Image (cartoon, grey):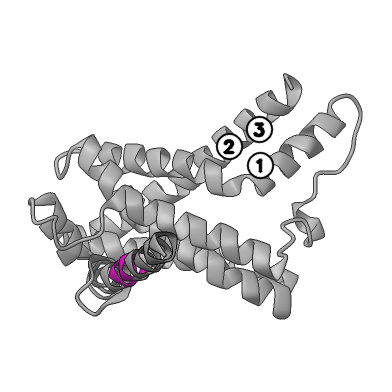
Amino acid sequence: MQCGQRMAISKVTFGETFRDLVDALFSVNAPLLITLKGLLKNPGKLLRSYLAGQRKRYYKPVAFFVLTTILYILIRTLIGFDPFRNEAFQVQDGAGSGTNLEEARNFMLLNINNFLFVFVFTLAAFSKLFFYRRYSFAEFIAISFYLLGIYTLITTVNMFFIMFISDKMQLLGTAIMLLYFLFAMSSLLKKPLVLNILKSIVVYIFAWVFYFVLAFSLSYLIVLFT
């Protein structure tokens, strides 16, 4: 009898906890939805508010990035997305270390969600380099976690376009992210608008190239020494 009562109490407690979790994540006034809405509608306002110390109402940047990454992995697994479906992204075998290069490419693509942390730091580093008077490096790290959380969502949606429309849409997510990054940075930094947009283009290109090079280099070293 007591065992049955305990099980019933446990079920009620679990049910209440689950409902509280869902309410905390997805209710209209939940930090997650407020953060997502702010990043899509007016990212500059949200970022300035967060950096100014008004943080309780927003989902934390690292947690937001991790949550979107988990969502990406989950959906990628559920739909069986193959990152190697486009031949343009394959490394051709050649003499010498061709096999290692291909294995490094495979490792990087299969673990791309882990290497996005590298993108966070390259984006923050180049943002600090070109906008050094605006915010500290730590603040640009927080900004980058938020923006790359959106990039992860864009990539997640883009998987469906790649699978069901065309393999040639592999770089669509990167292009959309560039537009979003320009929108977010111009919203955050405001004047001088044209100069900030031009700087943001350079920041994004350099950050993306260094991210790719570092991710591939790390993948190559891991493949080489394992």
- Give the residue type that dot 1 points to: Met
Q: Residues within 10 Å of mark 2 (few under 14, many from 20)?
A: many
x 58%, y 68%: residue: 172
Locate residue 142, reporting x and y percent.
27, 46
For the residue pair 23 and 143, the one nearer the viewer reads as 23
Which residue bears the numbered disc 3?
219
Disc 2 is placed on an element classified as helix
Q: CA distance from mark 1 to mark 3?
A: 6 Å
Left or right side of 149 for 222: right
The reply to whether callout 1 and callout 2 are in contact (CB within 8 Å) is: yes
- Give the residue type that dot 3 points to: Ser
Locate residue 47, reporting x and y percent.
19, 58
Locate residue 10, reporting x and y percent.
38, 62
x 32%, y 74%: residue: 26
x 16%, y 43%: residue: 135
The reply to whether callout 2 and callout 3 are in contact (CB within 8 Å) is: yes
For the residue pair 124 and 111, the one nearer the viewer reads as 111
Q: Of all residues shown, which one is farthest toward the front? A: 1
Q: CA distance from mark 2 to mark 3?
A: 6 Å
In the image, the segment drawn in magenta is 16-22
Q: Residues within 10 Å of mark 1 (few under 14, many from 20)?
A: many
- Give the residue type that dot 2 points to: Ala
Label drawn at residue 215: 2
x 66%, y 67%: residue: 78
Disc 3 is placed on an element classified as helix
Whether the magenta-drawn stretch holds residue 5 is answered as no
The reply to whether callout 1 and callout 3 are in contact (CB within 8 Å) is: yes
Which residue bears the numbered disc 1?
108
